[in-house]
């Protein structure tokens, strides 16, 4: 999290300083400066950033933990949480138990990630675009068969970050584990059958569209990629493809 100078925003006399600190942290979460799973700076660093005492920071952190925005990290520290846990476990069970549910999730991803790619093309910083490019480059390296799934997941998360939408980041965190399982599966036989180069081309198209600031091309590239994934899932199961929606041809 970048250091933020909030010294100009002094809490009012009627407001407890710890409550003001809690609000500053909530504002950072809402702006996407703190994302689900991210570890917060230590109490001392936060106190210096906000120009308050560590006692006030500690009280604010405790309040946000009680409200469910933050959780303690084993070994010390605090991280941002969102609506994961039970919901994620239920989704994982549903997807694993029925092939149709897996395909439904891919179609939902097409809608959500197409929207995110469109937003990324409009709002991504040069640094965020460069990060997506570096991840893409890692995916192309030879001898990384065991790591391509992780790179693929990092790619989609980087696009999510570049979308500039804290709401989308929190939604994505809800299905992050099952999404990670899907991505890993997409890089294993027999799902791939030597299609890694094609998958990389799909991701390259997404990156190029975002880099060119072309939102429609970015959304189309995501739709093409996940449409191909969906077709592979149906082919592997022997199930017929669902009818195309109006305007998809």
Image (tube, rainbow, N blue to C red):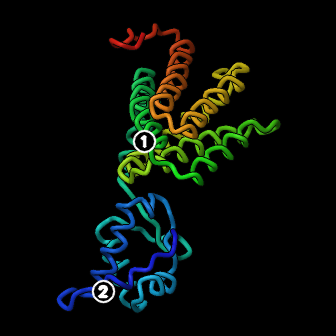
Image: 223 above or below 245: below
Name the residue rendered at 36%, 88% in the picture.
Answer: 56
Up/down of 119 relative to 3, above or below: above
Other residues around mark 2 within 10 Å, as few (<14) / some (14–19) / many (≥20): few
Compared with 3, 239 (above or below) is above
Q: Where in the figure is residue 152, as x and y percent of width and height?
A: 62, 39
Q: Which residue is mark 1?
A: 119
The quarter of the picture where residue 12 lies is bottom left
x then y, percent, for residue 101 = 40, 26
Badge 2 marks a residue whose secondary structure is loop
Give the number of callouts: 2
Callout 2 touching callout 1 (CB < 8 Å): no
Quadrant of the frame with the C terminus: top left
Q: SS for tag 1?
A: helix
Q: Looking at the image, which is closer to me, 5 or 13?
A: 5
Q: Is residue 57 left or right of residue 213?
A: left
Q: Position of residue 193 (x, y in %)?
A: 70, 19
Give the alpha-carbon distance from disc 2 to disc 1, as whole Å. Answer: 34 Å
Query: Residue 13 vs residue 47: left or right?
Result: left
Q: Residue at x 45, y 86 (%)?
A: 47
- Mark sitting earlier along the chain (2/1): 2
In the rendered image, which residue does mark 2 sit on? 10
The residue shown at (53%, 27%) is 221
């Amino acid at each position: 999290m970048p250091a933020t100078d909030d010294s100009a925003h002094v809490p009012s006399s009627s407001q407890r300083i710890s409550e003001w600190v809690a609000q500053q942290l909530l504002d950072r979460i809402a702006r996407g400066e703190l994302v689900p799973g991210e570890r917060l700076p230590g109490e001392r660093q936060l106190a210096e950033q906000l120009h308050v005492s560590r006692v006030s920071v500690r009280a604010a952190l405790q309040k946000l933990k009680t409200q469910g925005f933050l959780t303690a990290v084993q070994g010390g520290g605090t991280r941002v949480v969102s609506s994961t846990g039970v919901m994620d476990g239920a989704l994982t069970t549903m997807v694993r138990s029925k092939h149709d549910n897996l395909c439904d999730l891919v179609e939902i991803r097409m809608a959500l990630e197409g929207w995110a790619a469109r937003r990324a093309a409009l709002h991504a910083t040069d640094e965020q675009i460069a990060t997506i490019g570096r991840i893409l480059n890692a995916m192309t390296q030879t001898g990384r068969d065991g790591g391509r799934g992780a790179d693929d997941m990092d790619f989609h998360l980087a696009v999510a970050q570049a979308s500039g939408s804290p709401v989308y980041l929190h939604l994505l965190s809800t299905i992050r584990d099952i999404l990670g399982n899907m991505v890993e599966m997409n890089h294993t036989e027999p799902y791939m059958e030597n299609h890694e180069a094609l998958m990389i081309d799909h991701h390259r198209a997404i990156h190029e569209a975002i880099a060119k600031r072309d939102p429609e091309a970015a959304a189309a590239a995501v739709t093409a990629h996940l449409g191909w994934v969906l077709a592979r899932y149906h082919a592997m199961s022997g199930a017929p493809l669902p009818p195309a929606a109006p305007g998809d041809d």
